[in-house]
Structures are given as C-alpha cells and as structure tokens.
Image: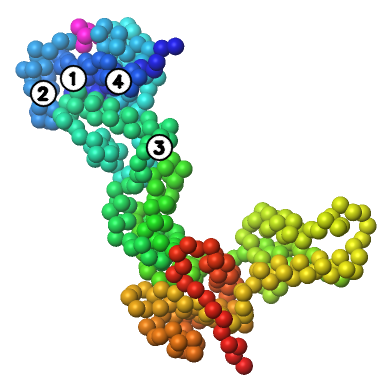
Amino acid sequence: MNPIRYVICDIEATGLHEDKEIIEIALVTIQDGKVVDVYDTLVNPLGKISDYIQDLTSISSRQISEAPKFYDIADSIWLRLQDAIFVSHRTDFDYDLLKRKFNDLGKNLELKTFCTLKVSQTEIPGLRSYSLDSLCSFFNIKIKERHRALGDALATLELFKILNQLRQKVYPKKLYLPQHELGMSKIPNRSGLIYFKDTSGKVFKLEAAANMNQRLKELLLVTRENKDFLMRADSFAGEVTGSPLIAEFKRLNFTPYRPEWCICIKFDDRGEKRFTIQPFKKGVKAFWYFEQLGDARRKMKSLLRDVETEKYIYRDGVKSKEEIIKHNQKIEALIKSAQFPLDDLIIIGEGRNLGEKSLILIRSGHVQGYGFTHAHRELILSSPETYIQRRFNKHLGVDQVAKRYIKELKNMRQKSDSWQGLAVIN
C-alpha cells in the first residue's frame, strides 16, 4: 500500500479578482513526513502586474516577462499533483485557480484537499484572525519570505504538520488563545470568582474556583469540543475572595439557585420511611435538590442501594417490625449525611489579602452570613456574629453549596478553610 502523499501549494497571483493569473507557484511534496520534492517557479501571466503586487511580492515585471508561461510548466505541475492530497492555506483560492488553468488546457483536476485555514478554524476556535501571519505567530512558525510562493508554502507545511497532530489529538503542547494567555498571567493562584465577558463586555458566565489561574487554564484550553465557549469568551476578570465557598455565594447572586426536583421522605401505612421524588415547591421539606430529573433519579437509585439489606432484599412478603426499624434508621443516617455536621458551626479560612481571615457562620442548620476580618481567631470564635458583613435568610442555594463544600473539605489535599462547632445561642 502506497503511503499518503501531500502536496503543499502556494500561489502568488495578479490579484484577488475573478480573472486573476498566476505569477508564481511553489509545490512542496511530503511523504512519510519527509519532504521528497520542492518545485518553485515564476509564471508569465501574459499581462501586466500592478505596482501593488510588485511591492507586495518583490516580483518585478521584468522577472515575469522572462518566466515560463503556464502551459509550458503545466505537465510538471500535473505530474506532481496526481494521486496527492492538495494542501494550501486557502484552497478556494489556490486550488480553484489551478483547476481553472488546467480546465483551460482541457484537463479536469480532481483532488482531495486540506485547507489549513478551514481546519484551523475548527481546531483552534476563537482566534481573532486566521491569516497565515496570525497562525504562524500563534505557533511560533517563522516565515522566511512572506508573499513569495516558496516561503509561504514552507510555512504552510509547518502549519499543516501541527494541524494534523491536533486532528489526531497527538499535539504535545497545551494551547491557549493569545488574548487569553496574556490575561491569564494576571489572574492569581487564589480562590475567587471568575467573570467571563463577551465582545460587548457583558458577563455571560461566572466560575467559582479554589484556584482561579488553574481553573482558567482548564476552561480556556484550545480544543474542538470547547469551540462555543472559546468563541464567546473575549475577556475575563478575577475577584479574589480568599474562601472558595464565598466565591460560590457570590456566584449565586448572579445565577440564582432554582431546583426543579427534590427528594423527600414519606411514611407508608406500616410506618416505613420511603424516599420519593417530587417537583420542588417552596416550603416543601426536602433533603436533596436537583435541577434535572435525571440527576434526581440517579441519586434515588444510590439511596435505595444504601438502604437495602440482605435479609429482605430477595424475600417475598412484608418486613418485620424490627426490619422496618433498622430500615428507618438507615434512612435517618442518610438524611443526617445530607445536613451540616452540626447545626451551629463556623468556617474560618484565608482572606483576600495578607493577614485577613474569611468566616462563614452557620446557625440552626442555615448559613447566616459571611465576612472578613483581621481579628484573632479567639475573638472571632467568641463573637462570630460581630464580623458578619453579608447576611442570608435561610437561602436554599447558599445552604446547599455550603453543605457540599464541608464534605469536600475532608478530601482536599490543601485545605485553606476549616470548620469547627460553636456554642448554641439561647
């Protein structure tokens, strides 16, 4: 089986108009990843070239007048292109022009094509420009002779190699858009809230992060799957909050918590507690909340697995009173796991600057509020309400993210926050 052969082509022409003519063409053939042939020649367009084109390409009218005509070199070009994949930075320019020239000679050029411009737009979404100059700058590709056919063809070859790796997902480097990479260096490795803005400057996404810089690098990584987000994210800004949980609270100010489903507890006629999924309504006593029904069902499946016992799971008939009691105890244990570890506790962590502390206060099973202070820990613990600057009144979303965060604290390798119980206020 013959290996795939690619011919990278670049054409300089008399202009962009419909009746444009070739003044220079370069063909670089690669096979097995190696350059096996280089062809480069000026072409007499049988007409004058404008001063603009002469200045752009540094090709003079005298050079053109002494160059071979296209029909003189057509066979050489045709042989190099046969059974190859045609590669150029704008195939609708280079390939279409060649196709027309061969058609004038009575030959029908039909090749598979690889347009580095179009592939770049797919593989590197969000770039402000996809010109050869911009892409070469993005990938640090040097162009030795810009607007000369061979120089541009060799640059396109290097671009083609990289794009091929990206399509096959074997490119070794992590890529970020230039406008993003510059901004990321200004975002610290601190907990906070990231504001993503579109081209109009409007915030369209907020992200709470324990490490803003690290999270930015995850979200802004150039991948095909990330296309829509990269194309929309024009700029971003970070707000240091010290505590990642306070960042979550701030995010809820912009994106309100609106669960659609919840899991509640009901009793059957024998006093056995059962989990039930139902639409969320304000005032309903529930223990787990969900935006999607599918998430509620997955949680329900997990809960039912946790309360099964070998004694009756495969047995017909009703449970005994003892089995119902044990079953209800398991239900209560699962309910407890969905609550705060204590009804009254405080979370103390890093602040926004050196020496500052953040604090989050939970009273009677609800987040009362948060604040920042430079006071000593002993003073905070003796009178935590004194330092609260933002208060909540049984805010469901705030309570839910706080419960989840306290559970996550157990598994965090680097803990910036810690919680402890407080004395009950009478």
Q: Position of residue 69 (x, y in %)?
A: 17, 10
Instruction: Name the N-terminal-most of marks 2 and 1.
Output: 1
Instruction: Name the N-terminal-most of marks 4 and 2.
Output: 4
Label 4 CA crowd tier, 10 Å (few <14, some 14–19, many 20+): few
Instruction: Name the N-terminal-most of marks 4 and 3.
Output: 4
Q: Quick check: is 379 in the magenta stretch?
A: no
Q: Secondary structure at mark 1?
A: strand
| Residue 251 visible to the viewer | yes
- The mark lying in front, picked from 1 and 4, is 4
Q: Identify residue type, mark 1.
A: Glu
Q: Position of residue 172 (x, y in %)?
A: 36, 38
Identify the residue under disc 2.
59
Q: Identify residue type, mark 3.
A: Thr
Checking the image for residue 122, the label placed there is 3
| Residue 195 visible to the viewer | no
- Report the span colored magenta: 70-74
Q: Secondary structure at mark 4?
A: strand
- The mark lying in front, picked from 3 and 1, is 3
Q: Is residue 225 left or right of residue 76?
A: right
- The mark lying in front, picked from 4 and 3, is 4
Identify the residue under disc 1.
24
Marks 1/4: CA distance?
Answer: 24 Å
- The image shows residue 86, relative to residue 392, as above or below, that is above
Q: Is residue 214 left or right of residue 420?
A: left
Marks 4/2: CA distance?
Answer: 29 Å
Checking the image for residue 34, the label placed there is 4
Q: Identify residue type, mark 2.
A: Ile
Marks 2/1: CA distance?
Answer: 9 Å
Instruction: Name the N-terminal-most of marks 3 and 1.
Output: 1
Magenta segment main secondary structure: helix
Label 2 CA crowd tier, 10 Å (few <14, some 14–19, many 20+): some
Residues at badges 2 and 1 in contact (C-beta under 8 Å)?
yes
